[in-house]
Image: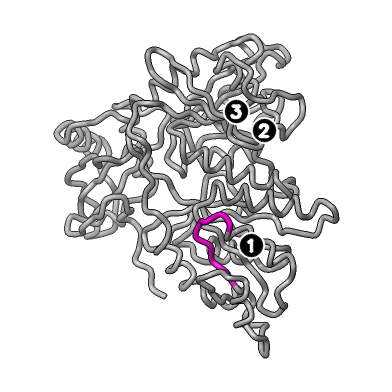
């Protein structure tokens, strides 16, 4: 099965060069670019962006600071880990400050990656009288001059980016199912990984942050090969320290992109955490299958059916932006519901791959519209004529053609998705509905709902 991998762009550099300003300028000021995950905040360290119909993950990283004796180790580990998972690296420097030793070290390590590297000379609005050509000595091309406060150079930067990032990364054509264990630190990912794998391959410790790389193992279940990926925990932005742990986030994002289905683990003793919701939003935005896994059930107090039945509605209300994600309570210690996780993953994979005939889809559309016709403005009432399923899309995606579709209310789109899921049981996976005017052309893979950008 082939699938698209969204490229990852990592912003690196020393502290106070304007990395976060650049990140926020791209993601906040241009609302057409922002792909806001449910449950996230604007100061997110990562977000999916789009430019000229090309999606990419943008990752803001901690500033590199002199850490005395640990500095060289820190800088090398940061850049090495970033370059292993990122597809493109943006090295940011300040236009009004001469090249520093930290700038040189970041540039050297980035270039050694042999990945595409951009040099972003930021704050050019403050650089009157400074020799900007001096930055050519860092040996990085292309060089883009930016001023985030004035939005100078942003369009050029993004235009240059989409020329080099891959539009799609095709996975090896096999029948292997890829599952990623995702969550905050110390929620039991490595313990569950070991239980699923039936062997001690990951480090299990009663403290946070023991997993930095993506640990992988392949098992067979019901005659199917399943790859399980254990990832480092994602911390709140304010909790992310300087050094190698910061880039565990880039690795986790890479694991989400490689996965078909993600198990989001939540500690039963620490439920309804905002960051868990944010991670669920990232997984949804990536178009991956999702299972909400309440871990460490063996450590819960009063862990009986009544408690579980009481908790489930509370968790469902917290994750109402992914109502299709199944919820399961597990324990890696006593093995409770571990086998059920494999069963759920295989069922979700079947749903994600199922094909519906056009005649069946149009029968459903007519019945749904007859049941609840869409409302609209006077002489602008939306009409939905027919629906087709997209070919070769790893996410179940459907194009609905009609007239005045831009007047469809968001609540009606939600109604259609709810009716659709009740009929076809797309549990555990996001689905995409694209509403298209019959006279408009549609290029596969690009949302027809995006307005053309004018700059």
Q: Is residue 415 visible?
A: no
Point out residue 392 in the picture as x, y percentages from the top left corner.
Answer: 27, 40
Judge whether residue 446 is colored magenta. Answer: no
Q: Which residue is mark 1?
A: 108
Mark toward the viewer: 3 or 2:
2
Determine whether, in the image, residue 355 is placed left or right of residue 297.
left
Residue at the image position 36 percent from the left and 34 percent from the top: 418
Whether tag 3 and tag 2 are in contact, CB under 8 A, the answer is no
Label 3 to label 1: alpha-carbon separation: 38 Å
What distance separates the C-alpha of mark 1 from that of mark 2? 27 Å
Residue 91 picture location, percent across and down: 60, 64
Q: Nearer the viewer, residue 132 or 255?
A: 132
Q: What residue did someone put label 3 on?
A: 265
At numbered mark 3, what does the secondary structure look like: helix, strand or loop? strand
Badge 3 local density, few (<14 within 10 Å), some, or many (20+)?
Answer: many
Q: Which colour style is shown?
A: one colour
- Of residues 171 and 312, the one nearer the viewer is 171
Q: Earlier in the sequence, mark 1 or mark 2?
A: 1
Helix, strand or loop status at disc 2: loop
Q: Start and end of the magenta stretch?
A: 112-120
Q: Which residue is mark 2?
A: 211
Quadrant where the image shows the N terminus: top left
Label 2 crowd (10 A; few <14 / some 14-19 / many >=20): many
């Amino acid at each position: 099965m082939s699938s698209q991998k969204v490229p990852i762009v990592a912003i690196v550099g020393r502290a106070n060069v304007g990395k976060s300003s650049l990140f926020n300028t791209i993601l906040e000021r241009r609302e057409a670019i922002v792909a806001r995950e449910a449950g996230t905040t604007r100061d997110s360290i990562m977000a999916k962006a789009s430019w000229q119909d090309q999606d990419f993950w943008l990752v803001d990283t901690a500033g590199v600071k002199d850490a005395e004796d640990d500095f060289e180790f820190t800088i090398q580990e940061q850049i090495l880990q970033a370059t292993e998972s990122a597809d493109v690296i943006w090295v940011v420097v300040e236009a009004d400050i001469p090249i520093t030793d930290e700038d040189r070290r970041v540039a050297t390590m980035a270039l050694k990656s042999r990945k595409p590297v951009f040099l972003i000379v930021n704050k050019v609005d403050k650089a009157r009288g400074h020799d900007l050509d001096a930055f050519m000595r860092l040996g990085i091309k292309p060089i883009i001059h930016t001023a985030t406060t004035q939005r100078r150079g942003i369009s050029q930067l993004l235009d240059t980016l989409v020329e080099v990032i891959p539009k799609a990364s095709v996975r090896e054509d096999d029948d292997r199912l890829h599952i990623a264990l995702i969550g905050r630190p110390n929620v039991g990912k490595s313990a569950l990984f070991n239980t699923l794998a039936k062997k001690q391959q990951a480090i299990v410790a009663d403290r946070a942050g023991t997993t930095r790389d993506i640990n992988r193992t392949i098992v067979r279940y019901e005659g199917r090969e399943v790859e399980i990926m254990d990832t480092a925990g994602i911390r709140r932005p304010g909790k992310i320290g300087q050094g190698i742990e910061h880039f565990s986030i880039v690795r986790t994002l890479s694991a989400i992109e490689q996965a078909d289905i993600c198990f989001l683990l939540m500690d039963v003793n620490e439920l309804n955490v905002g960051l868990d919701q944010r991670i669920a939003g990232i997984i949804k935005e990536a178009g991956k299958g999702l299972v909400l896994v309440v871990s460490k059930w063996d450590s819960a107090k009063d862990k009986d059916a009544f408690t579980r039945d009481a908790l489930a509605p509370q968790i469902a209300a917290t994750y109402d932006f992914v109502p299709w994600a199944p919820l399961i309570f597990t324990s890696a210690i006593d093995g409770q519901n571990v086998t059920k996780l494999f069963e759920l993953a295989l069922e979700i994979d079947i749903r994600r791959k199922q094909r519906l005939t056009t005649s069946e889809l149009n029968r459903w559309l007519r019945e749904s519209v007859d049941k609840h016709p869409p409302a609209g403005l006077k002489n602008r009432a939306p009409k939905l004529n027919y629906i087709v399923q997209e070919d070769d899309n790893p996410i179940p995606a459907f194009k609905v053609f009609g007239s005045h579709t831009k007047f469809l209310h968001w609540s009606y789109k939600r109604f259609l998705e709810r009716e659709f899921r009740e009929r076809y049981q797309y549990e555990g996976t996001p689905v995409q509905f694209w509403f298209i005017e019959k006279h408009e052309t549609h290029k596969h893979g690009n949302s027809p709902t995006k307005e053309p950008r004018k700059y």
